[in-house]
Amino acid sequence: MAVFLYSCDKDFNAIGEGLVGDDHFGLEAVKYDVLAYNQEVTPIQSSNIAPNNALGIFDNPLFGTTTANFVTQLGLVTYSPTIGESPVIDSVRIQIPYYSHITATDANGNNTYELDSIYGDKNGKIKLSIYESGIQMRTSYFSGGSQLPQYYYTDQNTEFNSKKIGALLNDSANRLENEEFFFSAKEYKDSITTDGNKTLLRVKPEMRLHLKKQFFQDKILKAVASKLSTEDLFQEYFRGLYFNVEKSGSSPSNMALMNFSEGKITIYYKAKTASTEDTDSTMEDKTIVLNLKGINATTSSTANFLQDTRSSEYQNAITSANKTDGDDKLYLKGGEGSLAVVKLFNPTDVMGYDDNGQVVNKPNNVPDELDEIRHNVTTKNWKVNEANLVFYIDADKMKGTEEPNRVYLYDLTNNAVLVDYSTDALSTYGGLITLDSDKRGKSYKIRITGHIRNLIKDATAKNVDLGLVVSQSSAVLAFNALKNKNELISVAPRTSVMSPLGTVLFGGKKGGAPDSDQEKKRLRLEVYYTKPN
């Protein structure tokens, strides 16, 4: 699906452009009602959401526990490799980089790192088990004579777990590589020898584990040559790796977003030298490298499995939404979580205006508040300078929980970006968290001026439903398919599937006392006008 980003400001501003100057009052804000309610996101496509894939267990006191397992295809860096005669493996190492940044560097050049995208206890541990996958991940399948894309979904962990093959691959005696694994922020120091000279190589924090040598001796070094000749044949032969996580005893757990797409497996081995000048017993060092993905980026080469054990509060909130009056609290959560449906303006529709600007007392399938805005702009020469939605965070409920840095508002009716969204103008579109004086989240503000202007200037424009989700990346605009679509949603933004976090916001429902948080912070559309003198 192509996404076109554009602006309509030039066309709209021609209406009443002469009013911008000294002959008008200052900006005035008018607030309009918004109806918003919770919507559950059921099992959803989680294949190919790289580079951000989750692994681990995240205990959230408000939302519940999310367990993230992972599966990936493998690809040889070089197909039809020359393995050599009588190969013997020295070691097999898997390396997957973490997201991190340097916090200090000492006089000797040693770097101190801090890991990014770690959720839960920073020192948490998990039981990590890596197996050969028994399911070949395909790109498509045939149904009713048609070729359809093959997706993998958040709820398929049981299927992949039941079909894993053989014994544990990360079977090191070092329990930090399996039974008591943790995401370490240490810097690695490797040495490279070139022409007899050693060079120190500093490597940023990564998952670095030793894998079972005999497995790779049999699977790769002893493989029939044809099995290693092409990507398709190799991935049918070696169907990938399955990463399974569990609680590590009574230790607290955590979760990380990892860059699996840059992961690799290196087989270090010796084989008889091919040189005619060496003796028959002379061995040389060799390597074979596998990437943790298929070479073809369009294939379903990875998938995240996200198992939620929801708190009763969260489960009840997203399965008992009030679609008539709206919900007083909006629960947003990434993964197989929830979003908010946002309907601009009070739904009351008992009147409208005719072409002459006269009131017509009958419904016209347009909210009366929108009719009034259109009337004020076209007949009174009001000008819309800015329109915003401000979502206030329920600080009491979010106390002690991790907050998402960004939320994302989109056209839910058409599953598209809003006109205001532009990768070049995110600072004005908004969605980033605003912090209060205690450094905790206060609100998220999103500018929808272009969207409101379009609704005003085109009387036939539909007042579409909007969707609000937590967002992991502002650059990801694609949508992922629900396993079983419902009457309201069939897809959800991929940026939300990628995020393990959640937040609770005040909805637009009325009913609180005038000085209550519910009333002061309830969701409303704020429109700033310039009016002629």
Image (tube, rainbow, N blue to C red):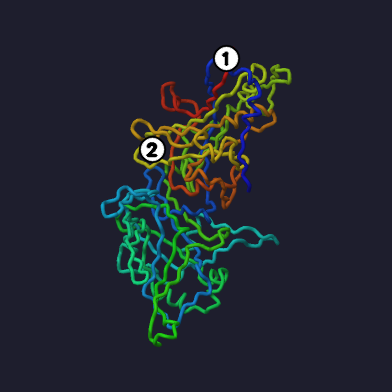
| The quadrant where residue 3 appears | top right
In the structure shown, which secondary structural element does the residue marked by tag 2 occupy? helix
Query: Which-is-in-front pick, marks 1 and 2?
Result: 1
On the rendered structure, is 82 left or right of 490?
Answer: left
**Residue that mark 1 sits on:** 24
Residue position for label 2: 398
Left or right of residue 411, residue 433 in this image: left
Disc 2 crowd rating (10 Å Cα; few below 14, some 14-19, many 20+) is some
Give the tally of numbered discs. 2
- Above or below for 327 versus 137: above
Name the one closer to the observer, 258 or 295: 295
- Residue 421 screen position, x and y as percent: 56, 37
Q: Residue furthest right?
A: 355
Quadrant the C terminus occupies: top right
Q: Position of residue 236 (x, y in %)?
A: 55, 70
Residue situated furthest top in the rendering: 533
**Residue 477 vertical placement versus 181 (above, below):** above
Place of residue 306 in the rendered image (x, y in percent of width and height, measured from the top left): 46, 53
Q: Earlier in the sequence, mark 1 or mark 2?
A: 1
Q: Position of residue 116 (x, y in %)?
A: 38, 49
Q: Nearer the viewer, residue 342 or 187?
A: 187
The image quadrant that residue 350 belongs to is top right
Q: CA distance from mark 1 to mark 2?
A: 43 Å
Q: Residues within 10 Å of mark 1 (few under 14, many from 20)?
A: few
- Left or right of 370, for residue 73: left
Residue at (66% x, 27% y) in the render: 457
Closer-to-camera residue (404/35): 404
Amino acid type of disc 2? Answer: Met
SS under mark 1: loop
At label 1, the amino acid type is His
